[in-house]
Amino acid sequence: MKLSVINPYDQSLITELTYDSDSEIETKLALATSAFQLWRKVPLNERSRIVLSALNQLKTDREEIAHEVTLQMGKPLAQALGEFDTLIDRGETCVRLAENALSPDILPEKAGFVRRIEHEPLGIIFDIAAWNYPLVIPINVIVPALLAGNVVLIKHSAKTPLCGIRLAKAFGNLEIPNLVTNMILTHEQTEQIIKDSRINHVSFTGSVGGGRKIYQQAAESLLDAGMELGGNDPAYIAEDADLEFTVPNIVDGAMYNAGQSCCAVERVYVHETHYDQFIEQAENILKGYQLGNPLEEETAMGPLASKNALKELEDQVADAVNKGAKLICGGKPVEGQKGNFFEPTLLVDVPQDSIVMQEESFGPILPVCKVANDDEALEKMNDTRFGLTASIWTESNEKAEQFASELNAGTVFQNRCDFLDPELPWTGVGESGLGSTLSKYGFLNLTRRKSIHFRVEH
């Protein structure tokens, strides 16, 4: 059976890959198990050196890898190159954080005893990676997992499997082979691997529905799991916001990568004093977006990765309009294109109960609602079952701190959005997921605590 990889820009066939057979899966699991027994004994300074050498190897193929990303999921080439550079930064930052994160916790002295807490590797980490940021999403797991002494099996999205191959090539066969192993799997095979007793942790990035299934499967084996499941991230333009700075940043936060970001701005609440001006400026920016071949330099927005997303986005727009919203621009697939293009869309006066305000769009839609004051904004921002990020656009640090204390979100931004700082934990509230990646806390999901309790005097 073959996996066909389709270019979302022109619907051409990029490549066909053969799914792993049962015997190939067994071999990969066995080799990963053996690799772990060797790798876990390698000192951290040596692990760090080897991981850095893999990152340096990746750098030599920067342009080729970025080109493959664009072909597979439609991201403009400049953005794909930027994602590659972010991969390197994330990896190198993780190496810098590793010693502090993985060093034993030394407890206060107690006469006659030695007490400390070790952070031990788990074993085989099964990383199920998403297509929207196909380089940085898996690197958030691969590098800390390896530094902690684990090995990784990577099952990349069916839309972007070449990224899994690239990462396994760079990290998989260094001084110890099979540290990272790529797998081409069906859903059924994925489920069977999660149930395999040799797997010690599952990391999943994707939809809430997919996350529920993975988590249920992991629970059957009492297997720990990390989940990053997206969001419906709000932004609030306060009365004291610098509008000239705020508007282009929010529009970019909603439209970058064609809106296919877990932490994209998905709904905007604007203080009534800025409402009309915000709409005017946002419309002007959106109408200036150039859609086209993502390999061409002038293209600002490429196609959506999935053709099915076009109908879903159109339905969200129709629902909002039916409930009283006004469509200012966009709102439909681009006509006369083979590619999966959806027009950059601005919706205003959008009711809070509309689908676009309650569900993740994952596309280039900017829904806007007027609010009278900060309290109304806070109430509506928290009216969600998600909680990945939220942004407050204000010149007042005090106001930002107040919102941060009351917003139910893993990350709260002031005057910034749609960004990950690798020294801060990436985590969510509610249906945005479980656990953390990045920062020193990203190592916690990938290690277990061992208590050392020695009586040295008796």
Image (spheres, helix red, strand yellow):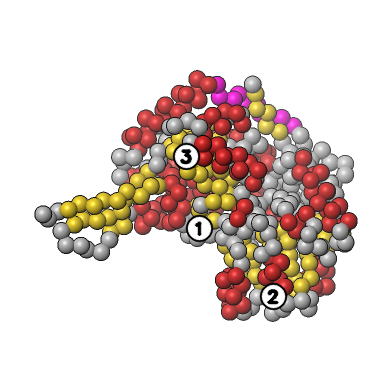
- Give the quarter of the image for residue 61: top right
Q: Position of residue 436 (x, y in %)?
A: 50, 53
Q: Is residue 65 visible?
A: no
Instruction: Pick whichever of labels 1 and 3 is earlier in the sequence.
Output: 3
Mark toward the viewer: 2 or 3 = 3
Task: Indicate which disc residue 375 carries.
Answer: 2
**Residue under the point 42% across and 26% down:** 30
The amino acid pointed to by label 3 is Leu
Q: How far apart, in angstroms, are the residues tagged by discs 2 and 3?
A: 42 Å
361 versus 5 height, above or below = below
**Residue under the point 60% across and 24% down:** 18
Mark toward the viewer: 1 or 2 = 2
Which structural element holds mark 1? loop
Task: Indicate which disc residue 373 carries.
Answer: none
101 versus 398 height, above or below = above
The amino acid pointed to by label 2 is Asp
**Residue under the point 59% across and 62% down:** 409
The quarter of the rendered structure image containing the C terminus is: bottom left
Q: Main secondary structure of the magenta part?
A: strand
Which structural element holds mark 2? helix
The residues colored magenta run 12-21
The amino acid pointed to by label 1 is Pro
Q: Residues within 10 Å of mark 1 (few under 14, many from 20)?
A: some
Task: Indicate which disc residue 425 carries.
Answer: 1
According to the picture, the residue beneath numbered tag 3 turns out to be 222
Q: Residue furthest left?
A: 458
Q: Residues within 10 Å of mark 2 (few under 14, many from 20)?
A: few
303 versus 239 height, above or below = above
